[in-house]
Image (tube, rainbow, N blue to C red):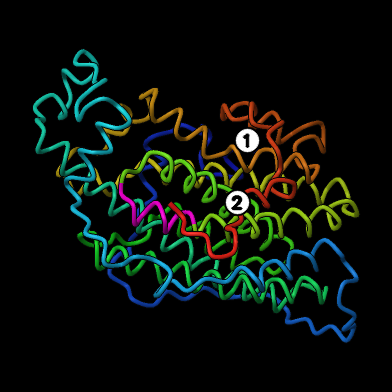
Amino acid sequence: MSRTEDILGRAEVDDIEAILAVTNTDADEIVHHVRDNADAIFSWDYEKGRRPALNRLYEKAKSSQWNGETDLPWDTDVDQEAVVVNNAMANMGGLMTGIDEAVVADSPFAAWGPQEWIRMGVESQNWTLSQFMHGEQGALLCTAKIVETVPWTDAKYYASTQVMDEARHVEVFAKYLEDKLSGHYPINAHLKMLLDDIVDDSRWDMTYLGMQIMVEGLALAAFGFIHQISTEPLLKQLLRYVMSDEARHVAFGVLSLKEHYAELTDAEMKDRQEFAFEAAVRMRDRFLQQEVWERMGLDVKQVVPLVMASPQRAMFQSLLFSKIVPNCKKLGLLDANGAWLRHRFTELGVIQYEDNPDTGEEYEMFQLAKGEVAG
């Protein structure tokens, strides 16, 4: 069995049949159980500031709390269909601009007119923000686990502030979906599988790697992209506030793991490299939005290859890794063990981001000034 098949359960990264075979068989469940195999660690060393970088992050977090109920203008009117049209006009020059008729000629998209494209845009909004909401709940559970399992007092202090952050993020995404959009989607199966694996792992640093570096790193890039292209003022402000927290969260992972990974063996580092690769592919796969195409009544196996071949989709998926790759490089994951992860990220087409600033260096640029109204 090849290593790719060992890690992903399929021999080829872009095997569409295998990707689509991963489905959420419990879409109607309300409560989902995952066994948490970690040991709870007490630390009797109460000296604050033993790790100065983490202490500074903790102090910053204490002064950066915001209230999702009162700090966002929830009285803003949101017309979903108008937002879809306005976003298309602002970013593409029109609703159907850039669609290659030759590419879609023999596909279900060939018969689509403006109303079908608008409906697809509405469903995509609902799906995208639903997956953000589910991911934020994953971060809520994982950060609570970090408080429980990390052996350093300074890290426990900071992680406790992130628990509050993540609760706030779940709250505001749920409120936006409920009050401003038109319904939410169940969790995507690829995201669910990844979150289950992160929670299930007993090692505290794997919780950091899976959530703080991979999931939160991708979310930070995705939030920034959507903030840039959205014309809806309430969503832009909501994302601006969330991004100010997320940058600290990713920096927390970088600062904590850099020290720990310097002490690991080659075999231990290889294990982390393989997990980072698996997480990257799982997150990439979830953005194929197969649930949206199903709800639109389309043949998913016919549509997804067109989606994967779209230059716009390829660019978007690539941009999602603009935070992950430099952070993996900072942690030494790219070049350990004969540059194993570097080769994998090259195959995924994302290695060009390796020299971007890592989030441990740039998180200050995301922070809201005191009293700032984000826009």
- The one nearer the camera, 145 or 54, is 54
Q: Which residue is mark 2?
A: 366
Task: Give the class, few, some or many, for how many residues have Cα within 10 Å of label 2's Cα (few <14, many ≥20).
Answer: some
Q: Is residue 73 above or below residue 79?
A: below
Where disc 1 sits, the SS reads loop
Q: CA distance from mark 2 to mark 1?
A: 41 Å
Q: Which residue is mark 1?
A: 2
Residue that extends furthest to the front in the rendered view of this protein: 371
Relative image position of residue 45 (x, y in whole percent): 90, 82
Q: Cβ–Cβ below 8 Å for labels 2 and 1?
A: no
- The one nearer the camera, 107 or 319, is 319
Relative image position of residue 224 (x, y in whole percent): 49, 44
Q: Is residue 256 magenta?
A: no
Where disc 2 sits, the SS reads helix
Residue that extends furthest to the top in the rendered view of this protein: 102
Q: Residue at x 26, y 61 (%)?
A: 76
Q: Amino acid at mark 1?
A: Ser
Which residue range is magenta in the image? Answer: 232-240
Q: Residue at x 69, y 76 (%)?
A: 147
- The one nearer the camera, 6 or 308, is 308
Relative image position of residue 192 (x, y in whole percent): 45, 60
